Amino acid sequence: MSAIAITEAAQEYLAGLLAKQSAKDMGIRIFISHPGTPHAESCLAYCRFGEQQPDDIAISLKDFMVWIDGVSEPFLEDALVDYATDALGGQLTIKAPNAKIPMIDDSSPLPERINYYLQTEINPGLASHGGQVSLVEIVEDGVAIMRFGGGCQGCSMVDATLKEGVEKTLMERIPDLKGVRDITDHTNRENAFL
């Protein structure tokens, strides 16, 4: 179970909002955008059953389901979702004191460091073109094998993105990384950005 706390008042308020939705299988998804960076933001969104991500952590509350984004989960440690009423009405708040704290250091395993920078620096930039890149594996010589998806798959600029964007950023941040290789099948240009 995640270390996030959702107060009774917040659960009642959210249950009321969900009851007004036309879809009866609606729940809530909680995530951090740009986790571990100064730009981190706590986010809460409607989520229908089946729309959650494979690595999400499911929490079954009395009246609805909550899915915690798997990547965001460590940054939501000690987080609190609360609802408070005042003279002007009420306000739902999410306090996540660890949202901006990097969860890696130089001693973290190489795949964790790579995934951290992919999530916090590289993929947010690629998302503006509908793309993303993910780590497939690290081969014995210290080279990261990557796969592009979305708008990056089949894009005519993918070589420049790989060398000038992904590889350059990762090698600046992770000195023991020896290089980056792309294994994406770029013959599929269906969603390509360029």
Image (tube, helix red, strand yellow):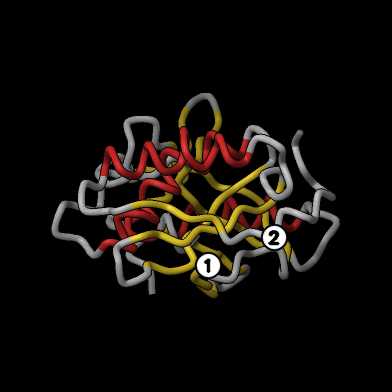
Q: Position of residue 167 (x, y in %)?
A: 41, 43
Q: Secondary structure at mark 2?
A: loop
Report how far apart the C-alphas of labels 1 and 2 lie in the structure: 27 Å
Q: Amino acid at mark 2?
A: Asp
Q: Which dot, 1 or 2, sits closer to the camera?
A: 2
Question: Of residues 90 and 175, which is closer to you in this image?
Answer: 175
Q: Secondary structure at mark 1?
A: loop
Q: Amino acid at mark 1?
A: Asp
Q: Position of residue 194 (x, y in %)?
A: 76, 33
Residue under the point 81% across and 49% down: 189
Pick out the residue farthest to the front: 141
Report whether 178 appears left or right of 34. left
Residue 96: image quadrant is: top left
Residue under the point 62% across and 68% down: 64
Question: Of residues 116 and 163, which is closer to you in this image?
Answer: 163
Residue under the point 32% across and 31% down: 38
The circle drawn on residue 184 is none
Residue under the point 54% across and 75% down: 60
Question: Of residues 186 and 88, which is closer to you in this image?
Answer: 186
Q: Position of residue 1 (x, y in %)?
A: 38, 75
In the rendered image of this protein, does residue 36 appear above or below residue 141? Answer: above
Query: Which residue is identified by label 2?
Result: 185
Query: Which residue is identified by label 1?
Result: 56
Whichever of callouts 1 and 2 sits on the residue coming sooner in the sequence is: 1
In the rendered image of this protein, does residue 129 appear above or below residue 21? Answer: above
Around disc 2, counting alpha carbons within 10 Å, would you say few (fewer than 14), some (14 to 19), or many (20 or more)?
Answer: few
